[in-house]
Amino acid sequence: MTVGADSEAIRGAPIVEQIAAARRALTLRFRLTFVFVWLVIILGIGLALAVADAWDWEFAFRSGPIIVLQGAGITLLLSVASIIGATILAVLGAIGRLSSNPVAYAVASFYVSLIRGTPLLVQIYLIYFALPQLGIVLPAIPAGILALSLNYGAYMTEIFRAGIQAVPRGQREAAQALGMPERLYMRRIVLPQAVRIVIPAIGNDFVAMLKDSALVSTITVHETLFLAQRLGRSTFEPVTALLIAALVYWALTIIFSVFQERLERRMARGDQ
Amino acid sequence: MDKMRSLAILPIAMLVLAACQAGDGGGGPAATGGTGDGAVCDSGELDGQLAAVCEAGVLVVSTDPAYPPQSFLNEDTGEYEGFDIDVANEIANRLGVDVEFTDPTFDAVVAGNWSGRWDVSVGSVTVTEERKEVLDFTQPYYYTPAQMAALADSDVTGVEDLAGQTVCVGEQTTYLFWIDGTLSLPAEAGEIAAVPEGMQATTLPTDIDCAEAWKSGRTDDFQGWLTALPTAQGAIDNDYPVTLIGDPVFFEPLAVAFDKSVEDNDSLVAAVDEIIGQMHEDGTLTSLSEEWYEGLDYTTQE
């Protein structure tokens, strides 16, 4: 088996270079196969849809842009606002969970227990329908953001707690020896290190949030799934509409995963 | 500390942005109301909820845009369209306020206790005795026949063939109540056909989902589909494998609905009821029905 087009030139080269070239060829072959397999699967799915006559191009061209532009815009807005809200709640929650103050510990533990013990959909409905009974009428989008923030905040609280605990205890003693107050030690020493540890986890949660935001379609928010369902039913093309919604979520997660990978690589560089 | 503070401002800015979105893109005010001429809101002495709506200048209307041709989203622009939408716009116009649409699920509408999230439902809600306990209704603005349908190439030729079979209906619809034997329409709605022995209901979130299940090949789950005649006809017109079975099983009066738990709602109910009466008299409803239902006038009960 030949290694490549310029194998003649390489044969005379030192063994190290020969091995490097062989490795490059292997990598290339791996990547080409990867792309090829993806194309085959995508073509297969496309063919199956065409045979089943499930995909309607006319609907895709007419209503697709509304789902993609307006729907994905609201989905992104929901996800970004909620991950920010969730991060803030998680920092507070984690500090509470690690606190020696019994009240702070109890409040934080109650929050995590209640939210993790109830379905997100129930929380969304309660914030939309039950809060107004107490006189708090949030518009649909802020209600959705609040529900997603509270929900993810609880899960991320545990992640942040682990991140904070991962900072070696010796550093606390060192800080105390320097006379550093507890709050300053938390902000300057612990949090910067903890953040680096939890960044990949936040990224994962953001990808999950992008998809869970679809649940907010049940409380009248015109996000991707809402528009896809209503436009699909309006035009008797629900399957095409759902497929477009699936593609929107998939594309958003792929785009974000690329960013996440870069961010993680940069964070990792700091460790070296 | 400064960094922390600016971080805290971010979500607040996001919320403000989101609230704006809810007003523009999300809620989508579809009509510019308020032609001053003879509008109810300009008539001086107002009280209760009517005064509150006039004060706000906006009537928040619930509709589910999944039911063409009553209420749906335009496939090019994504804006609200349909018979219910035009009726809602005209009601707001005659009140002298703007319209803002919101889209809760149907079961949330008929459950009552709207928490003030919307003022009124112009969403083809059937008047039933049970719903009257949580909702206030105006006089009907139109009537639709409840039509049984079956899979196009099935052996079912009459409603009685579906005895002992399963029929698909939308969640919390009158069609579900009919099969369950709990449907009680007001006396003026006319006769209700008997339910065939042993007929069972299965529900999906909205009526159209039943036809979609058949189209997708899910043909064994249920043998019949009970829905409004225009909805069934719409499915047939769009090449769904559906056929109409027998005469309508009942005619349902559809009216504008209000949340009964809202205090001082009487003034608003009375004002809208009067507007519906006017729209019947001056032919507005008839021409809207003929426009959206291919020349058919559903606004009177034959």
Image: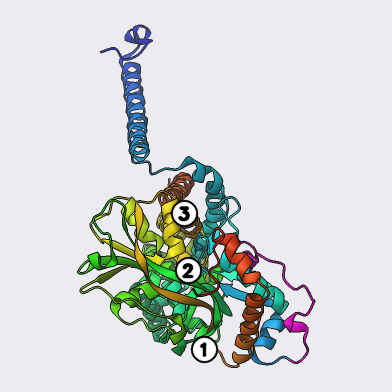
Q: What label sits on residue B260 in the rendered view?
A: 1
In depth, the one of B254 and B14 nearer the eye is B254
- Circle 2 chain: A
Position of residue A111 relative to residue A20, above or below, is below
Q: Which mark is residue A232?
A: 3
Task: Identify the residue shown where x is 49% and y is 59%.
Answer: A230
Are the residues flagged by discs 1 and 3 from a single subunit?
no
Q: Any magenta on residue B20?
A: yes
- Which image quadrant for residue B163? bottom left
The image shows residue B28 at horizontal and vertical percentages of 62, 64
Q: Identity of the amino acid at label 2?
A: Ser
Residue at the location (59% across, 89% down)? B265
Residue A83 visible? The answer is yes
Viewer-side label of 2, 1: 1
- Taking depth in this image into account, of A126 and A60 the one nearest to the observer is A60
Do the residues indicated by labels 2 and 1 lie within the same chain of the protein? no
Query: Dot 3: within a 10 Å radius of its alpha carbon, few (fewer than 14), some, or many (20 or more) residues?
Result: many
Q: CA distance from mark 2 to mark 1?
A: 33 Å
Q: CA distance from mark 3 to mark 2?
A: 29 Å
**Residue A139 place in picture, x, y as percent:** 57, 73
The residue to which callout 2 is attached is A149
Q: Which residues are magenta?
A: B18-45
Q: Earlier in the sequence, mark 3 or mark 2?
A: 2
Q: Amino acid at mark 1?
A: Lys
Q: Report whether residue A98 is seen.
A: no
Q: Residues within 10 Å of mark 2 (few under 14, many from 20)?
A: many
